[in-house]
Image (cartoon, rainbow, N blue to C red):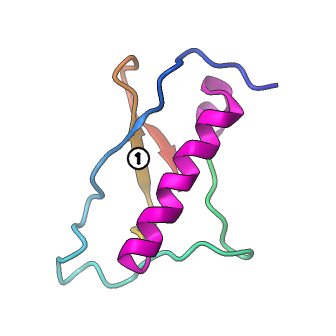
Amino acid sequence: MLLCHSMERPILKRQEISFDHPDSENFFRPGPEKPFAATPAAIAMYREEVIIACLKILWQQAEMHNGLDYLQVFEDPDKDRGTVVH
């Protein structure tokens, strides 16, 4: 069972390099060999349902934009720092 200090789902921050920027050409596409992963801190901080909801958002964004930057950050308004999912 995962501990959850926050009941709200964190909010996905805009990725560092915008999708339409020329440097945004190496998109991460999740798959069996390269799955999305949550940091140990995120896993300790949120319930499994929250982590899964965040991962679904990332899957949707990857589909919409043909991939994502390798690093995605969710912010929790109740926390001091972001939660990293990549």
User: What count of labels does the image hold?
Assistant: 1
Rendered view: 33 above or below 77 = below
Q: Give coordinates of residue 42: x percent, y percent.
A: 59, 34
Q: Give coordinates of residue 80: x percent, y percent.
A: 36, 21
Q: Give coordinates of residue 64: x percent, y percent.
A: 39, 73
| Segment tinted magenta in the rendering | 39-67
Residue at 53%, 77% in the rendered image: 29
For this view, does 57 lie left or right of residue 17? right
Magenta stretch secondary structure, dominant: helix
Rendered view: 31 above or below 86 = below
Name the quadrant containing residue 10.
Answer: top left
Q: Give coordinates of residue 38: x percent, y percent.
A: 61, 46
Rendered view: 6 above or below 40 = above
Residue at 39%, 68% in the rendered image: 69
Residue at 59%, 72% in the rendered image: 30
At label 1, which amino acid type do we have?
A: Val
For this view, does 65 lie left or right of residue 16? right
Question: Among all residues in the image, which is located at the extreme right?
Answer: 1
For this view, does 43 lie left or right of residue 27? right
Name the quadrant containing residue 25.
Answer: bottom left
Q: Is residue 66 magenta?
A: yes
